[in-house]
Amino acid sequence: MHPANHLNQAPEPAAENAASRRQALYQTLARVPAGQVISYGRLAELAGLGRAARWVGRILAQLPEGTRLPWHRVVAADGRLSLAPGSPAGDEQRARLRAEGLTVHGNRVDIRRHGWNPDDAAVRVRPLPATTKPHVP
């Protein structure tokens, strides 16, 4: 295939799907209020991504430095913080959560007390059509 023809082609379906999945994740994450946390799995579910907790973790690990998305509000299902204590990202997560009024005890937050439990119908996001501009975190 000639390189010039390649530039005029539509994105591969897999690339479009990945972009729409990321967009749905970013939109849902942006709605998690200060002082509350959500599990990776619940975030995936609300974003319309099914059982994609590990995928959510991988995508959050790839967010650019300085992102405005509240990545620090995402924890394991039992409230455990996934980022290691003493690591720069782990220390930042703990500091941000504490600044929002959460107590981090034993590398966990009380997800029963601080877990975000929105009305599914009001929050659930559907992946966007490929024609929309993707959100850059």
Image: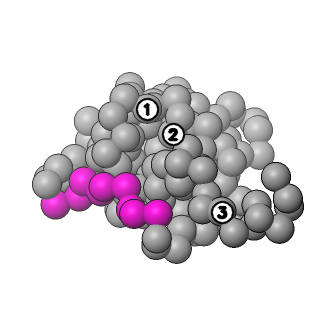
The front one of 85 and 7 is 7
- Looking at the rendering, the stretch of residues picked out in magenta corresponds to 122-130
Q: Residue at x 46, y 63 (%)?
A: 130
CB contact under 8 Å: marks 1 and 3: no
> Is residue 50 left or right of 5 when viewed as pictured?
left
Residue 129 is left or right of residue 88, and the answer is left
The structure residue drawn at horizontal position 31% and vertical position 39%, both measured from the top left corner, is 45
Instruction: Please identify the residue farthest to the bottom as the structure is shown.
Output: 133
Residue 64, placed above or below residue 15:
below
Contact between labelled residues 1 and 2, with CB atoms less than 8 Å apart:
yes
Q: Quote the CA–CA distance across marks 2 and 1.
A: 6 Å
Q: Which residue is labeled 1 in the image?
A: 52
The Cα atoms of the two marked residues, 1 and 3, are separated by 30 Å
Disc nearest the viewer among 1 and 3: 3
Label 1's element?
loop
Q: Earlier in the sequence, mark 1 or mark 3?
A: 3
Which residue is at 30% across, 55% downward?
A: 126
Q: What amino acid is labelled 1 in the image?
A: Ala
Residue topped by disc 2: 56
Question: Which of 9/56 is in front?
Answer: 9
Q: Nearer the viewer, mark 3 or mark 2?
A: 3
Query: Do we see residue 70 in this rendering?
Result: no
Q: Position of residue 78 (x, y in %)?
A: 38, 25
Q: What residue is shown at x 43% (from left), y 32% (from top)?
A: 52
Quadrant showing the C terminus: bottom right
> According to the image, label 3 marks what residue?
9
